[in-house]
Image (cartoon, rainbow, N blue to C red):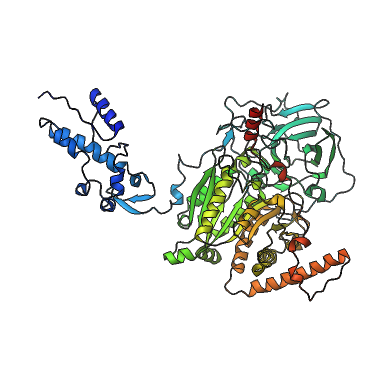
Amino acid sequence: CNVVLKISLPDPYEDFMYHHLQYYGYFKAQKGSLPNSATHQHVWKNNPRYLLSGSFGEREDVLPDPLQKEKLLWPTCLSSTVHRQIAAVSRDSLMLSSPLLKSRQLLHDEFGKVNPCLREPRDLFSFFSSGGPLQPPRWPVECEVIKENLHHIEWVPPQPEYFYQPTGNEKLPEIVGEEKGTVVYQLDSVPTEGSYFTSSRVGGKRGIIRELAVALQGPEDNTLLFESRFESGNLQKAVRVDTYEYELTLRTDLYTNKHTQWFYFRVQNTRKDATYRFTIVNLLKPKSLYTTGMKPLMYSQLDADTHNIGWRREGNEIRYYKNNTGDGQQPFYCLTWTIQFPHDQDTCFFAHFYPYTYTDLQCYLLSVASNPVQSQFCKLRTLCRSLAGNTVYLLTITNPSRTPQEAAAKKAVVLSARVHPGESNGSWIMKGFLDFILSNSPDAQLLRDIFVFKVVPMLNPDGVIVGNYRCSLAGRDLNRHYKTILKESFPCIWYTRNMIKRLLEEREVVLYCDFHGHSRKNNIFLYGCNSNDRKYWLHERVFPLMLSKNAPDKFSFHSCNFKVQKCKEGTGRVVMWRMGILNSYTMESTFGGSTLGNKRDTHFTTEDLKSLGYHVCDTLLDFCDPDRTKFMQCLAELKELLREEIHKKFNELGQDMDLEGSWSDISLSDIESSTSGSDSSLSDGLPVHLLNIAHEVRW
C-alpha cells in the first residue's frame, strides 16, 4: 500500500534526524548504534530494577514502551522490519543516553552488561601508549626549539669535589658589551615583560629553525658555537670580547624581566690547551653561594662517551660581583670563571646545577610504568594540564589493603617538587625518594603498608621546559598562589590544593613536604610552621630534628626556621598548615654543598640528594613508630634547645630570665628571626595576561 509514514519520535532532534536520514535513504536504525538522546533518562533513574539488572536488551518488561501510543497508529502494511527499526531508535536512545552508560567509572563485563561498581585505578603500564600522555613537551609558540634529544648520564665522582678556595688574585672583568665585542649567539625574539602566554605547540615556533651560532670561517676558526634552545636551556646572548673570553646574557623568566639565576647552555668547537673565561653579566641576586666556594657544573660529551664521566664541578678564578652596568634602578651582578676544556672539538655543557628535565621525568615514569611489580602499588594519574598543555602527574603509592577498614586506617603523606623550575635539586631528592619507596626493601614495604603517598613530582612543567628559574608561563611565582581561585591561570596549584583538600576529608595527612633549592645557604634544611596549639607545642620540630640525626653530614637542624611570615601566606607550606596539616614543610636543598661532618666543604652530588630521599623515608618510620621513645627523646631535646635559645636572646637584650618560670609561654615567633628566604614576592600578584587585559580595558 502507498502510505506516507509519519512518525513523531519523543525527542525533537531524533525526530528531525530520523526524517532527514529517511528521506535520503541512509537510515538503518541498527541496534547497537549510538544515538544521543536523553529523552527518557527519567525512566532509567526511576527504575532501579533495570539499572541493577546488568542487561540492556533482556529486561524490556520493566520499562514502559515510550512509543506504545504511536505504535497503535502505525499502518498495518508496514513490514515487521520497519517496526523493529523504529522501536530500536527509542530503545537504544533510551539506554545509551543514560548517565550510567556515559560514565567511564563503571565496569562492563564481556557481554556488555553493567557491573555497578567503581572501576579500579588504571594500571601504570596501560597509562603510557603511543597516543597517551608520554608526549613531546609543548612550548610557547614564540620559542624556537632545536630538533635534538639531549641525554646526560648519571655519574658520581670517585673523589669529593671541594669548594673553590679564593686566592685574592681573581680578576674582575669589566663589561665590554656588543659595542666593542662580537655577538656570536643571540635569540632574536624573547617574550619578556609586557607580553603574555597565548598558545603552545609541540616543537615551539613553526617554521625552519635558524642557525644562531656564527658560521666558522674554516678549521682554524676557534670561535665557540653556543646553543640553548633545548629543554631547560636559557642562554639569550653570547658576546666574544677576546680570543677566548665571552660575556653571556641569560634570558629572564618568560613574560617577566626578572629571575636570572639558573643557567644551562652548550658550547662546541672547543680547544684543549686554551684557558677560556666566561662571564655571566645579568644576574640579579646580590648574594650567591659562588662567593663561598661553589663551582659551576661542566659536562663533556667526549668524556661521557669514552670514559662514562658525567657532570663535574669545574672552574677557577671564580668571582661573583656587582658589575659596572645597569639602568640605575636594577643593579646587575656578574659571575666569572675560567676553564680549560679536556678535549679539542668537544661538545660541552655548563649548568648552575644538575639538570633534570620534563623529559627526564617522563622517561623515569615510563620505566616505573613498564614494571609489572611496581605498577601493583603505584598508580599514575594526570592531575591536570599546565597552561601549555603539559601533563602534571600524580602518583598514588600504597600497598593493596586486605580489607576496607585497613585501607581507611592508612594515613597520608604528600610530597611535591619543582614548583620553582630552576631548583632541580628538588627533582633529585624526589627521585631518591621514589627509588626507595618503589623498591622491595622491607622498610619500603612497611611504609607502603601503613601510608598512602600522594606525589606530584613536577608542579611546574612549563617552567622546567622553557628554562625558567622561578615562574610559570603566567609570569608569576606559583609558590605564592596556593590560595588562588584562578583555576585557569594557575591550574597546577589549584588542582594540587584541591587534591589535598579532598584527601584531608578522608584521612589524616601526617606530613606535607615541598622540595626546593636554596641559592644562598649551604646544607639541607626545612622551613616549618610553629604550632599555635599548646597541646602540640614543638611537635612540628620533631621530624626535622630526627632527619638531622639520620643525615648528620647533609641536614642542618640549626638552619631550620618555623616562623610564619605574612609574605609567605600564599606558599604551599603555610596554606597546607592552615588547612590542618601540622607537619607542613618546605625542604630547602643547597645548590652548593655541605659544611657538616665528613662532607664539610664539599659539593653535593646527585647521589647525595637522592640519599636525602631515602632519609625522608627512614625518618618517617622513626616519626610514626608506635614506640614513642624516640619521639619523646627528641621532644625533650627540643625543649632544652629552646631554653638555651631563649636564654641567649634575653642576654642579648640585657634582661634576666627566670628559667624556672613560664618560659614555655614565650611566643616562638618572637625569638626566631625571619628566614633569609627568597625574593619570590617580586612575582606574586595577578597573572600577566590579566594585567594586560586590565591595562587595555583601562585605556
The location of residue 204, given as percent across then percent down, is: 58, 31
Q: Is residue 192 left or right of residue 497?
A: right
The location of residue 695, given as percent across then percent down, is: 66, 30
Which quadrant of the structure image shows residue 182?
top right
- Could you tell me if residue 356 is visible in this image? yes
Please determine whether, in this image, residue 570 is positioned above or below residue 180.
below
Q: Is residue 468 left or right of residue 401?
A: right
Q: Residue at x 84, y 40 (%)?
A: 322
Which quadrant of the structure image shows residue 71?
top left
Q: Is residue 507 left or right of residue 673?
A: left
- Which quadrant: the C terminus? top right
The location of residue 375, given as percent across then percent down, is: 47, 54
Q: Residue at x 58, y 24 (%)?
A: 207
Please determine whether, in this image, residue 200 is positioned above or below residue 576.
above
- Which quadrant: the N terminus? top left
- Could you tell me if residue 273 is visible in this image? no
Q: Is residue 676 left or right of residue 40?
A: right
Front residue of this view, candidates 266 and 42: 42
Please determine whether, in this image, residue 90 is positioned above or below residue 544.
above
Which quadrant of the structure image shows residue 696?
top right
The location of residue 628, given as percent across then percent down, is: 61, 74
Q: Residue at x 36, y 44 (%)?
A: 102
Q: How many marks?
A: 0
Front residue of this view, candidates 569 and 138: 569
Front residue of this view, candidates 422 and 542: 542
Q: Residue at x 28, y 46 (%)?
A: 43
